[in-house]
Image (cartoon, rainbow, N blue to C red):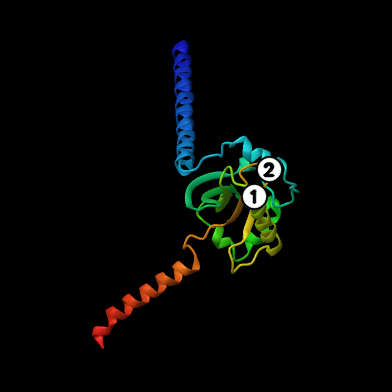
Amino acid sequence: MLPIVSVALVVITLLMVKLYRVKKNGRLQNIYSMDTADYRPYHLFAPGSGHSQNLLASTHVVADHWEIPLSSLKFGPILGQGAFGKVALGRVSRAMLTHRGLAPFMADGGKERLKDGDTLHATVAIKMLQEGCDRKLHEDFLKEIRLMKRIGYHRNVISMLACCTLREPLCLLVEHITRGDLHNFMHQCRAAQSRVRRDISPMR
């Protein structure tokens, strides 16, 4: 009788261990699938041409608290582009922004601008130069970054969050405003007001 009970206990124990492992693997798979689904549109940047790297090597750049590693960025879809470069939707760790001294910004009125449902990452707009640009555009972009640093944060304007200037592509991270620029927003408001007036005019 005793051997039968011992065998039964061993079998039950093995079944419980197997069931625990299945549940654990299922949880990990769900977490992984949510993470990959969340980041499917985003990717890490691959280094570009040697021309850009040589141009950067000849430019004097001083890293400060605004500087973050290019490897910490995830690049998403392109929002717009022109002759100078392009602007992409991106993501960066909120911990990285806080570590760079942006905790007061995130706790202030700007908190809602970074609040996108993800407590670990912030959605940002990444402005970057086209690869192979000439020296003048390169220097003008660095001047723009220095100007944004001097301006700092203001709750009524799109503010700089960080930059990547130690390797190509040069990147300027700013707040991402989901409603677009002020001109388009005002145009949408006027269009909505016009529709309301048309709807209520027959009632007079």
Q: Residue furthest left?
A: 202
Q: Could you tell me residue 59's position as x and y percent?
A: 72, 46
Task: Evaluate whether residue 166 shows in this view.
Answer: yes
Which comes before the other along the chain, label 2 or label 1? 2
Q: Which residue is mark 1?
A: 138
Residues tagged 2 and 1 counted as in contact (Cβ below 8 A): yes
Q: Is residue 102 left or right of residue 84?
A: right
CA separation in Å, label 2 and label 1: 8 Å
Residue 183 picture location, percent across and down: 47, 69
Instruction: Kindly give the residue lying farthest to the bottom in the view shown.
Output: 204
The answer to whether 147 appears left or right of 47 in the picture is: right
Q: Nearer the viewer, residue 186 or 106?
A: 186
Q: Amino acid at mark 2?
A: Leu
- Secondary structure type for disc 2: helix
Q: What's the residue type where badge 1 is placed?
A: His
User: Pointer 2: residues within 10 angstroms few (<14), some, or many (20+)?
Assistant: many
Q: Residue 109, how many percent across, how many down?
A: 60, 66
Among the 4 quarters of the image, the one containing residue 147: bottom right
Disc 2: which residue:
56
- In this picture, residue 151 sits left or right of residue 120: right
**Do we see residue 120 in this rendering?**
no
Name the residue at 34% across, 77% down. Answer: 194
In the structure shown, which secondary structural element does the residue marked by tag 1 occupy?
helix
For residue 133, above or below residue 23: below
Quadrant in the rendering for residue 115: bottom right
| Quadrant, the C terminus | bottom left
Residue 186 percent coordinates (x, y)? 45, 72
